[in-house]
Amino acid sequence: MSTASVGELVSQPYKYGFVTDIETEKIAKGLSEDVVRLISAKKEEPAFLLDFRLRAYRQWLQMDEPDWAGLGYPAIDYQNIIYYAAPKQQDKKASLDEVDPKLLETFDKLGIPLSEQKRLSNVAVDAVFDSVSIATTYKEKLAEHGVIFCSISEAVKEHPELIEKYLGTVVPCNDNYFAALNSAVFSDGSFVFIPRGVECPMELSTYFRINSGDTGQFERTLIVAEERASVSYLEGCTAPMFDTNQLHAAVVELVALDDASIKYSTVQNWYAGDENGVGGIYNFVTKRGQCRGDRSRISWTQVETGSAITWKYPSCVLQGADSVGEFYSVALTNNRQQADTGTKMIHVGPRTRSTIVSKGISAGHSSNSYRGLVQIGPKAVGARNFSQCDSMLIGDQAAANTYPYIRSQQSDADIEHEASTCRISEDQLFYLQSRGIGFEQAVSMMVSGFCRDVFHQLPMEFAAEADKLLALKLEGSVG
Amino acid sequence: MIRPDAPVLLEIRDLHASVADQPILHGVNLTLRAGEIHAVMGRNGSGKSTLSKVLAGHPAYTVTGGSVRYRGEDLLALDPEQRARIGLFLGFQYPVEIPGVSNLEFLRVATNARRQEGGEEELDTFAFEDLVNEKLQVVQMDPAFLERSVNEGFSGGEKKRNEILQMALLEPVVAILDETDSGLDIDALRIVSGGVNHLAGPDNATLLITHYQRLLDAITPDYVHVMAHGRILRTGGKELALELEQRGYDWVDAEPAVLEAV
Ligand SMILES: Nc1ncnc2c1ncn2[C@@H]1O[C@H](COP(=O)(O)OP(=O)(O)O)[C@@H](O)[C@H]1O
Ligand SMILES: [Mg+2]
């Protein structure tokens, strides 16, 4: 086959698109106060949590779906979604031997082996299937260090005081439309607690798998690092291919106390829909970290490759003096995908610093926007921000936009913003090809070069994976 | 070195090509045998770069007639990367910059692609570093250039040296050098021509596209061709270049064309 012109698009089949045939327990479609109560009851939650959910639900009813991101999609019918689905095997088993082999097989197929012999060494995994966490590896080993890593449902039962103390303190239940919805109906997710002075001895990771076609996914993740504690956490996500859209509205809250550090990495590969934009996940996610303590540090790294729609702005509230927020992002869109993603760096405390590095790659007929806010409050004396937003266009049908917002109440704030746009040119590809480098490899070399600054931030085990993932996503996208 | 019995490496027959629906090549004929050095001269816009890009397989250029055989094989049926792997090399007139792609990594991937095709084993980073350091001598290039992105921020002369470095690593069977000499100062010209002479041998052939006699003082061609209006209008020995130097190109158009291929 000879090389056609840049811009012709043939998407690589999505290799995680299979459906696991497993019996699930689902509640009826639709959302009401009764449904919220039912979810809470199924999970045998304490009163404070039911109360939290109901407050969120009532607020949500008063709110409007946001439209400022300019994303185009048909209206979501919230009454046509199932808000709770779980594999029939209800409670979490003490040992993996009791977990349905079909589930283990599913995660094996996804490259996340959970069984004792095959586990990733030095990475503890919480596996969430549809709405429910089915297994968490290395729990005992972590417990020796005082680290709590479990599903949030389990944490509600075993550490209710921690949940009550921290849940909703970073993302209040009425924060935004999708966060309110999540707060009302969230099903499961991960909970991490690193006690004072502990450096978490291994990478923690949650792997989210959507399986059902008509079920919404509403996970809730909460990570707390006490004084001088540190942790690196990675989430991965995939979903089967359906020709309908699934709603995913997650909330992630991070809390870092004095001198604590949290590194949160995401490799998002939800099903993106086909080349005509049929199907795919609607990803409306609220992620926020609060650097509550002095000299604390929160770092977000994301590699966003999937979803039909991505609406996501992992943010940092830099409250403690000298605290540091970072956001490193690669967002790749192909075919008809739409992404509106970026960050908010809210400088509250003195001498707070933030860094934003965003790399957007748009191919096909996709649209990819960076939207970011840098806000410097009246007490943030000596605050500094550096932002760099680069876009790469592949072909001539894709769109890239950058919307940087800066609000400063400090005259001496040091804010630097750089932006660039480049296009992979036919001549560059030809140059590489004329040296014996295949077309796809040529594209992937250029794309990895473009993303290098961000990939360097990923935990080592996953950097190579991310590289491969991008190559795979772009396979046939130029050609 | 002309040896009438040497194997034919490249045989271009009545090649027609267009770009953006505009016909540029109107029947090029040219035969390169092993051991030969050919020079193609001609005014700006006569189609020299077009010929070189068509041979290398640039997707913007469409072949509308004729044939090209490379060691007997139909060259035009191959992807550009495959042409490179089997030993065709084009030194670009304007090498592009590729930000973010490390020069060293690029050279290694390219070298391994060529080696693999020849059934040789891939070089790991260490073995490759040894090889590249040896080849750097040929072009007298600072190893610091390996650490940078491909051609990014290189001066004109540095880009050309990087081209010759690639040629040294890829050890082509047929090398086409498109105005590798233009924009070079005397020292750079000496290095580049030294490199080309070093790499030319009895088993390969070189096609030099140039405007200037000064390159041909350093590299002695076996044949000189003059291109005009997308055709080779005249062919001679190295003295033809001297004649062009003295008389310019006008007389080529004026005198009856010599269209037979060599
Ligand atoms: N990509 C292109 N698009 C349009 N015209 C081109 C392109 N490349 C070459 N040409 C035209 O083809 C003719 C020959 O150009 P070229 O092969 O570069 O000549 P030379 O290398 O001999 O100076 C010129 O008229 C030039 O404008
Ligand atoms: Mg030219």
Image (tube, rainbow, N blue to C red):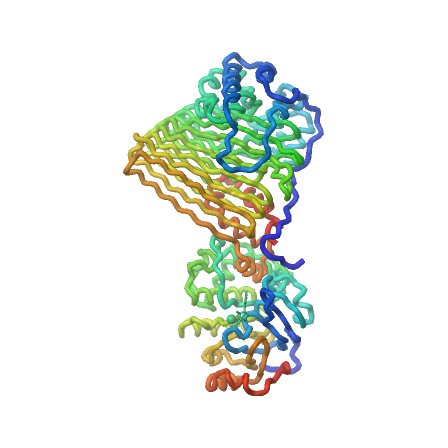
Q: A309 or A325: nearer the eye?
A: A309
- Residue at 44% in and 25% down: A170
Corner quadrant of residue A77: top right
Location of the N terminus of chain A (image quadrant): bottom right
- Residue at 43% in and 38% down: A372
Instruction: Give the number of callouts.
Output: 0
Residue A95 can be seen, yes or no: no
Corner quadrant of residue A6: bottom right
Q: Establish if B216 lies above or below A220.
A: below
Residue B133 can be seen, yes or no: yes
Location of the C terminus of chain A (image quadrant): bottom right
Corner quadrant of residue B53: bottom right
Q: B23 or A421: nearer the eye?
A: B23
- Residue at 55% in and 43% down: A333
Q: Residue furthest top?
A: A47
Please give left or right for residue B232 compared with residue A313 in the image. right
Task: Indicate the position of residue A141 as horizontal and vertical percent values.
Answer: 53, 26
Please give left or right for residue A410 compared with residue A234 in the image. left
Task: Indicate the position of residue A265 as horizontal and vertical percent values.
Answer: 50, 35
Regarding ligand 1, which quadrant of the image does it lie in? bottom right
Q: Establish if A206 lies above or below A14.
A: above
Task: Indicate the position of residue A11 as horizontal and vertical percent values.
Answer: 63, 46
Task: Indicate the position of residue A267 as horizontal and vertical percent values.
Answer: 54, 37
